[in-house]
Amino acid sequence: MSCPHVGSANLSKPSPTDNVYREDCTQCFDSVDDPAGLDVCLKCFNGGCAGDRNHAKLHSTSRNHPLVLNIRRTRKTIERNEPPLKMSKLAIAAETESDRYDTTLTVKCLECRIDSLDKEDATMAPVIDAVLKANTFSRKEEVKAWEQELTSCQHILTMQQGEPRNIESQHLGHCSKCDLNENLWLCLECGNLGCGRAQFGGVSGNSHGLAHATETKHGVAVKLGSITPEGTADVYCYNCDEERIDDNLGVHLANWGIILADREKTEKSLTEMQIEQNLRWEFSMTTEDGKELTPVFGPGLTGLKNLGNSCYLASILQCLYDLPSFQQRYYGDKLGPLPSVSDPAQDLETQLRKLGDGLLSGRYSKSDSDVFASEHTPNVPHQKGLQPSMFKHLMGRGHEEFSTMRQQDAFELLQHLIKLITRSKHPAELGDPTQPMRFVMEQRLQCLNCNKVRYSSNEQDSIFIDVPMEKLPPGEEGQEPKYKPVTLKQCLDNLTASEVVELTCAACGSKDGFTKRQAFKTFPDVLVVNARKMAVVNWVPVKVDVPVIVDDEPFDLDEYLSKGQQPDEEALPEDESAKNKAPAFVPNPEALAMLEAMGFPRVRGEKALHATGNSDANAAMEWLFGHMDDPDIDVPLDLGASSGGAASGGAGAADPEKLAMLESMGLSGPRAVKALKETGGDVERAIEWLFSHPDDDGADAVEEKAPAADAGPKKEAGSSELPAKFQLQSIVCHKGTSIHAGHYVAFIRKKLSEDETSWVLFNDEKVVKVVDVEEMKKTAYVYFFTRV
């Protein structure tokens, strides 16, 4: 049967810059593995499910793109009576997709309802072939998975090597200072061979390579066992204290008589060892007696596949979509149809609803074991997990950190997502799902001389708690140091404790200082707590595992509610000379000088000292590491300005200077105003937004009306009603010495049946019921408490 659309479709092959969505639907997680398969548009390469949800048909109708390539994939059945061979090294298996799957291809016209067009047609065949060979959208992301974005440095580019000589092979067998014969690093400047630092995974090292670099100032070394004939290797610059790339490694090695073609890789690279360490969280998937924890399936029990260092994203998403406000906002019958947009993969609303359906419906929560194990090889099937590739790309677009494949700070990601969602449009009947996290903190300042007070408030969506660190007596030699456990109450007591700060009183002129105390003016429905367990070692922040004891039963926070200004308290005067004038802040000159010497701008140093008591440069530096991504980090300190916290980010008039920058590039009018608003005033991200939203005219950005004069003040976030009882609902746990490495998982309290509520571990795609979560609660990084 002929189709009139084939000849008139004007099809073209996907270019290298085109996204080809041929794995899962852009509007739901139905994929090529479902019975109906996936329809890939042969015009724009959108992927639409071909099953009962009809997203392919929806796309075809709205875009007038009728021709699609239907791809269906079925898993080949393997019968196995013996366990698979244990991998002897970390490597990518040579197994291909055709080894694992049978794939069926069909060309269809959705408008003519023809289910089998000729794949060999001269118009379509080249396009079909190009679609199948093109990197898929997720593959583009996965290509970078587990890779660090390494660069060269000035020390490598300007390196001066010693006189050329051939280093005999017998002199490359062990460290020049000890007998170690592995983890050996060759100094590229003088040819010295020294052992490296001890590495996780049992790799020995006495740091003689580092000692040589310190003594001689020779900064660049290469790990001998990591050198491949292709010219890749672990290259480290001790001066930068960073792993680097040496584009002229072959030449530099030849200076010492080492020929690349003759080398053979014999040891794991640093990246491979990092991968192995990240994957070692698997120990938590078993009980104390070695039995595997039981997988659970159903609505709200769907895992997320690790895209390569994306566990920080998976753990936060699981906790967010466990909240009732997110479930109501992004999943359910009240939502109506999905937005009609030209590119669903680039639309935040669509992708958030896609995640809601994927995580909450239970549609994808099913075991993925097609391996038939005999009774001698018990197999515990887990889920395949959803691939949130589209969402990860979308939420990280234009962001310096979240657009990379590197591991990130889960709490910083949470703050980033809250900002993105807050700036989005929300139906009035559903509202902003982050609103239940918002509350008001109140700060009280009292002059030590005249005793006059000033109260100020700030809307927030989370709190930081500094965890006290007290080392326990050392144990056996070689053991990691252990710390004295603290309670959550101790941390909250410290957060709300009074402290003396060095300020000059605007009323009496005294420089004696003020007492400062903060407390809750209102409480949220969901209290998010970030436990900061950072110690500074050699000016480098290192995460330490201090156990924090958190009750499993509900507890109240009534004592942390601010009492507000009392009748017997006299406020700082509001006359013309002092109206809206906050106490003058004089930063500690010695501490500020130390921060500036470390490279921190003066404005940031002043802010950090003000926030941490104005005495300790170390405390201020830790504060700065935790607030580097604050949108107002470079705005001068203004104690008299009101702050809207997360709720106000991105609102208000566009900066004229930034508008002028966009106009100079030919990007002007309402679209430019909206772009700046949607990206929090970030010019680079605004440009990206403009190019990714070509159909948005920005009209709604100028249609926002000022609130009516009689509308009254904005309602404060949260509630001051008592009792304020909270219970731990979920936690994000982290393993590793840095929040930018290691592995994140989530533990969530789930109702598994009418009679059973249990903690459930979300470890990427693996979702299992756990019996004891007490140890994990002690070392959590982010806590979600719900008001009960």
Image (spheres, grey):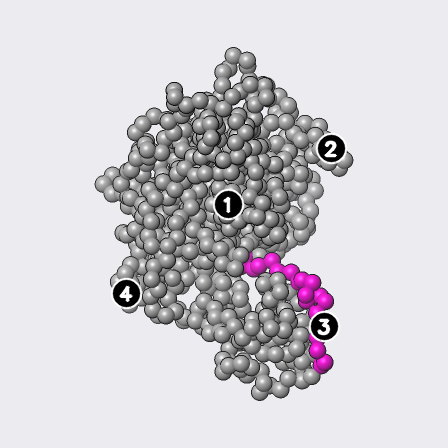
- According to the picture, the residue beneath numbered tag 4 turns out to be 375
Q: CA distance from mark 1 to mark 3?
A: 45 Å
User: Residue 345, can we see it?
Assistant: no
First of labels 1, 2 by sequence position = 1
The three-letter amino acid code for the residue at tag 3 is Gln
The three-letter amino acid code for the residue at tag 2 is Ala
Query: Magenta residues, as a range?
Result: 145-164
First of labels 3, 2 by sequence position = 3
Q: CA distance from mark 1 to mark 2?
A: 41 Å
Q: What type of secondary structure mainly makes up the magenta span? A: loop
Question: Does the stretch in magenta take in 154?
Answer: yes
Please name which of the two marks, 3 or 4, marks the residue nearer to the observer: 3
The C terminus: image quadrant: top left
- According to the picture, the residue beneath numbered tag 1 turns out to be 615
Residue at 73% in and 33% down: 660
First of labels 3, 4 by sequence position = 3
Please name which of the two marks, 2 or 4, marks the residue nearer to the observer: 2
- According to the picture, the residue beneath numbered tag 2 turns out to be 660
